[in-house]
Image (tube, rainbow, N blue to C red):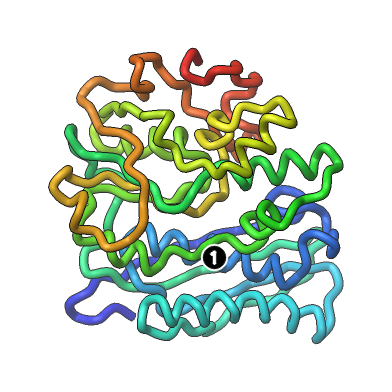
């Protein structure tokens, strides 16, 4: 558990076949990739608190499995735990879990960790800059391509199946940021959580600054898709979204992109003053929220 100087942090994640990954298709989502991806997603919550992961409990509900099944799945889990241990300088151990019968594959992970001062999503202040690690849009584009029956190029496949683990970045950021979370539902929707929890604040986003790969832009152009909308609404990115005081801009020794600013006026706006509608994944509606297809220019939403 946590040391005397640190506070305990805990997070639970559940992943269900046909919702978080397709009905078992080993040509795309191998058991190794499922183990890898679910572990990154679970540890990502600790990264967003600026903490270190210490212990992991893994429970699996499965219809049929043998020793080889579990070995492949846990190979993916162990690969991420090895990377996590290296990134944070403290070993992450699997200390328990459960196995039960289920018609559909269900995975539940609980991670226990520690943080000197856990970062919440409720500390943003007017005048803060908004930062994000990595780049955005590839995950949603990968899902779209699969639904259209397309084949994923490697640069889409790797982001979907083996997303980046941001524990090291979270630890580096924790002394400099006011609020932070990981992007699981989409940048705009997750940013709206920060704004609401910070006292109903607002934000201005510079759409030209959004970190979108040239490959994503070109792929979207071929499909007739707006890459900016995908960057704003792509969920399960597991990148860190945070707010920080301007004076910390050059104090953080990691790569990130500054995309906007926190303001007093509630709502999210682009740099032209047009209001942006939060878009992202709504689990209970099992759809992208809002449900209507976004306009060609999301700044007019």
Answer with the quarter of the image where residue 96 lies: bottom right
Answer with the quarter of the image where residue 104 lies: bottom right
Quadrant the N terminus occupies: bottom left
Q: Front-most of 227 and 19?
A: 227
Judged left or right of residue 85, residue 258 is left
Residue 172, how many percent across, how many down?
28, 65
Rendered residue at 71%/75% (across/down): 73
Q: In the rendered image of this protein, does residue 191 appear above or below residue 117?
A: above
Q: Front-most of 275 and 68?
A: 275
Rendered residue at 49%/65% (across/down): 165
Rendered residue at 39%/63% (across/down): 47
Q: Which residue lies most toward the left here?
A: 247
Q: Which residue is mark 1?
A: 40
Q: In the rendered image of this protein, does residue 18 appear above or below residue 222?
A: below
Judged left or right of residue 250, residue 233 is right
Residue 260, how many percent across, how many down?
31, 34
Q: In the rendered image of this protein, does residue 14 appear above or below residue 209?
A: below
Q: Front-most of 65 and 192?
A: 192
Residue 211, how many percent across, how many down?
46, 42
Judged left or right of residue 201, residue 221 is right
Mark 1 surroundings within 10 Å by alpha-carbon count, few (fewer than 14), some (14 through 19), many (20 or more): many
Answer with the quarter of the image where residue 108 lies: bottom right
Q: In the rendered image of this protein, does residue 89 appear above or below residue 130?
A: below
Q: Secondary structure at mark 1?
A: helix
Rendered residue at 30%/40% (across/down): 130
């Amino acid at each position: 558990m946590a040391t005397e100087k640190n506070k305990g942090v805990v997070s639970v994640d559940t992943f269900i076949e046909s919702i978080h990954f397709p009905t078992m298709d080993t040509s795309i989502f191998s058991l190794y990739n499922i183990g890898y991806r679910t572990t990154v997603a679970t540890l990502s919550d600790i990264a967003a608190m600026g903490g270190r992961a210490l212990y992991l409990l893994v429970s699996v509900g499965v219809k049929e499995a043998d020793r080889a099944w579990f070995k492949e799945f846990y190979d993916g889990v162990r690969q991420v735990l090895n990377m996590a241990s290296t990134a944070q300088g403290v070993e992450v151990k699997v200390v328990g879990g459960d196995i039960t019968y289920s018609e559909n594959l269900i995975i539940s992970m609980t991670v226990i960790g520690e943080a000197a001062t856990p970062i919440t999503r409720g500390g943003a202040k007017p005048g803060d800059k908004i930062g994000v690690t990595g780049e955005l849009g590839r995950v949603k584009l990968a899902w779209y391509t699969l639904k259209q029956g397309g084949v994923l190029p490697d640069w889409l496949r790797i982001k979907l199946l083996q997303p980046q683990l941001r524990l090291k970045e979270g630890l580096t950021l924790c002394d400099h940021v006011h609020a932070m979370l990981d992007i699981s539902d989409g940048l705009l929707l997750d940013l709206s959580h920060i704004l609401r929890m910070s006292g109903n604040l607002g934000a201005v986003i510079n759409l030209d600054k959004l970190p979108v790969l040239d490959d994503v832009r070109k792929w979207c152009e071929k499909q007739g898709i707006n890459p900016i909308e995908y960057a704003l609404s792509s969920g399960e990115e597991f990148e860190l979204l945070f707010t920080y005081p301007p004076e910390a801009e050059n104090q953080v020794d990691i790569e990130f992109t500054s995309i906007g600013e926190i303001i007093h006026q509630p709502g999210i706006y682009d740099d032209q003053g047009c209001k942006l509608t939060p878009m992202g994944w709504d689990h209970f509606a099992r759809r992208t929220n809002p449900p209507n297809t976004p306009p060609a220019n999301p700044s007019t939403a």
